């Protein structure tokens, strides 16, 4: 929904700051509790820090870069030489200033992104 998407983007925007604050508060709490704790409580304190540090690290990652591997230098062939594409294959087609290219969806399923220039215009084709 629109509200859910807005909420997700809000969390994404604030998550780096909030997780850093949570990590600092957690470290301060562990330092405060450390001296009066037995060995097994110290172990619990250290284990409790693991998900907080994990969340702090993940909040600074771009997950889309992990999932989508752009094809940075696409190679072209003439239609008559494209034996790897059949007539029934779906393609993403782009035409700009008299130049046209087609990206087979079957091949885009892995990369999801192609950085390209068509007709002198830089673009990113995505599937």
Image (spheres, helix red, strand yellow):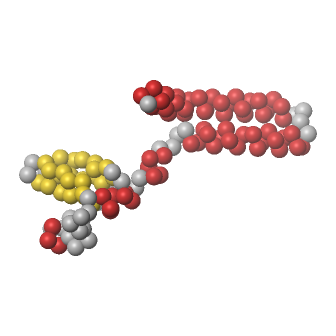
Give the residue drawn at x 47%, y 44%: 62
- Work out whether 6 lies above or below 91: above
Name the quadrant containing residue 102: bottom left
Residue 9 image position (x, y, % from top left): 46, 31
Give the residue drawn at x 63%, y 43%: 54
Q: Is residue 13 visible?
A: no
Name the quadrant containing residue 43: top right
Give the residue drawn at x 24%, y 54%: 92
Q: Is residue 74 left or right of residue 52?
A: left
Q: Quadrant of the N terminus?
A: top left
Q: Which sits in the foreground, 117 or 34?
A: 117
Name the quadrant containing residue 70: bottom left
Give the residue drawn at x 36%, y 54%: 112
- Work out whether 5 lies above or below 120: above
Q: Is residue 25 left or right of residue 7?
A: right
Residue 47 image position (x, y, % from top left): 76, 44
Q: Is residue 85 left or right of residue 71?
A: left
- Work out whether 87 lies above or below 45: below
């Amino acid at each position: 929904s629109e509200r859910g998407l807005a909420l997700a983007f809000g969390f994404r925007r604030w998550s780096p700051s909030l997780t850093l604050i949570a990590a600092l508060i957690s470290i301060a709490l562990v330092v405060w509790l450390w001296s009066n704790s037995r060995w097994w409580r110290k172990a619990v304190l250290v284990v409790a820090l693991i998900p907080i540090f994990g969340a702090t690290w993940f909040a600074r990652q771009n997950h889309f870069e992990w999932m989508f591997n752009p094809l940075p230098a696409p190679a072209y062939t003439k239609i008559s030489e494209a034996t790897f594409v059949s007539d029934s294959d779906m393609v993403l087609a782009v035409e700009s200033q008299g130049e046209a290219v087609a990206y087979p969806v079957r091949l885009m399923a892995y990369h999801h992104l192609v950085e390209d220039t068509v007709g002198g215009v830089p673009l990113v084709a995505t599937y």
